[in-house]
Amino acid sequence: MMLGFPCSTVSVILVIRARGNFTVDLYWKDNNLTKVVVYSGSGVPCSIYYKGEKLEFQTNAGCSYCIENDNRRLTLK
């Protein structure tokens, strides 16, 4: 997944389907990604790229994962 949608205020983009049978919720504030919620439909590895940062993790089918961006790095919560 490549994330880079510009936005000027607090926004949520819901129900984006991504390769690998993922559903992704994106949360933005002041043109910066603040949080991503990933739902895995297949249980395959997930890779997220944002502003040169890469986060990879294994998923389980039917589970959700919360990733937060503290403007320095992406963190799986």
Image (spheres, helix red, strand yellow):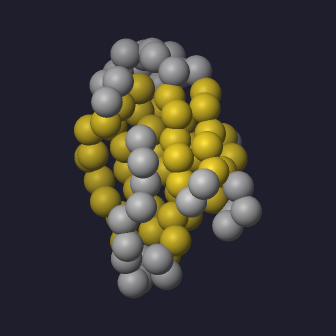
Horizontal side of residue 17 vs 24, given as left or right: left
53 or 62: nearer the viewer: 53
Spot occupied by residue 67 in the image (x, y as percentages of width and height)? 58, 46
Placement of the N terminus among the 4 image quadrants: top left
Whether residue 76 is visible: yes
Give percent across and percent down for residue 73.
Answer: 70, 55
Q: Across the whole image, how many numbered discs are drawn on residues?
A: 0
Up-down relation of residue 62 to residue 33 (above or below): above
Q: Is residue 68 visible?
A: no
Q: Quadrant of the C terminus?
A: top right
Q: Is residue 13 left or right of residue 75?
A: left
User: Left or right of 48: which side holds 72?
Assistant: right
User: Which of the two residues, 46 or 15, is positioned nearer the viewer here?
Assistant: 46
Q: Position of residue 36 (x, y in %)?
A: 49, 50
In the displayed structure, would residue 10 be above or below residue 27? below
Seen at 63% across and 58% down, the residue is 69
Residue 28 sits in which quadrant?
bottom left
Quarter where residue 43 is shown: top left
Residue at the far right in the pictured view: 72
- Residue at the location (41% across, 33% down)? 39
The residue lying at 51 percent from left, 21 percent from top is 45
- At a point 58% along the width and 21% down the height, the residue shown is 58
Work out whether 6 lies above or below 39: below
- The image shows residue 2, relative to residue 8, as above or below, that is above
